[in-house]
Image: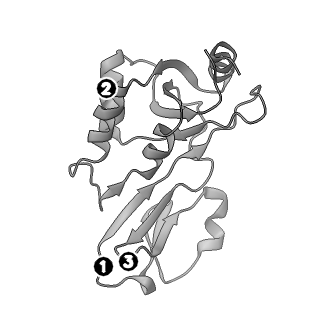
Amino acid sequence: MHYTEFSKALLLHPGIIRLELLTKDLMAEVRSIENSPLNVGFMPIDPVGYGEVCSKKLKLIAFCSTEFPMFTERFMDIVDSRGMMIGHDVLDSEKAEYDSKDYIWLTNNLFFDMTMMGEHHLKCAIHSLALNVEGLDDGICPRVYYPCAASADHLNEKFGASGKVSSTVIIGVDGITF
């Protein structure tokens, strides 16, 4: 699929306002922010999804409005230092399936199972998600990564994005020609 058709399809996707190429320099800057020890909320973050989108041939920054469909599938795993998943995020439509006295809810959609908790370090692995866009050729399967707030702010500042922009995401895709 040619980039012209691909970018048109993306710009017709709900909420995508603007696209910019993610250059190698910017990719390194964002990687540094994503991997920073300062990028810690309640536990360290492992941005595995950033590596997933950056492994694609074409990498884009998408500046989005509130109409962009966020979090269409599970993408966060709480993993201990043994590599065991002890929790994850939950879509609103799935919450009834996760009603247990053993679950500790860290946010309204992120929990861990206290019976699996041990004397181990925890991290939150953030994965990329499939981005389902109408009008793409068969085999064109973009992935989207939701960077941390510091990375999004950095990109917004670099490109002067403001106003209607409510989220900034990174898209990676293979199979696009120029």
Q: Position of residue 171 (x, y in %)?
A: 53, 33
* Residue designated by label 1: 120
Mark 3 lies on a secondary structure that is loop
Residue type, label 3: Arg
Tell me if mark 2 has few (under 14), some (14-19) or many (20+) residues whose alpha carbon lies within 10 angstroms of its own: few
Mark 2 or 1 closer to N-term? Answer: 2
Asked if residue 44 is positioned above or below residue 140 in the image, the reply reads: below
* Residue at which label 3 appears: 82
For image coordinates 66% across by 26% down, the residue present is 13
Q: Quadrant of the N terminus?
A: top right
Q: Is disc 1 surrounded by few (<14), some (14 to 19) or many (20+) residues within 10 Å?
A: few
The residue under the point 29% across, 59% down is 44
Where does the image place residue 40, in percent across and percent down from the top left? 27, 54
The amino acid type, in three-letter code, at marker 2 is Asp
**Number of other residues with Cα within 10 Å of mark 3, as a class: few under 14, some 14 to 19, many 20 or more:** few
Please identify the quadrant where the C terminus is shown: top right
In the rendered view, would you say 110 is above or below 59?
Answer: below
Question: Of discs 2 and 1, which sits in the foreground?
Answer: 2
- What element does badge 2 sit on? helix
**CB atoms of marks 1 and 3 within 8 Å:** yes
Which comes before the other along the chain, label 3 or label 2? 2
Would you name the residue on which mark 2 appears?
25
At a point 70% along the width and 31% down the height, the residue shown is 133
- Please name whichever residue, 88 or 51, is drawn nearer the observer in this view of the structure: 51
Q: Please give the name of the residue rendered at 53% of the width and 36% of the height, measured from the top-left corner.
A: 56
Residue at the farthest left position: 38
Q: Amino acid at mark 1?
A: His
Cα separation between marks 1 and 3: 7 Å
Q: Are marks 2 and 1 in contact (CB under 8 Å)?
A: no
Q: In screen coordinates, is 30 left or right of 178? A: left
SS at mark 1? loop
3 and 2 marks in contact (CB < 8 Å): no
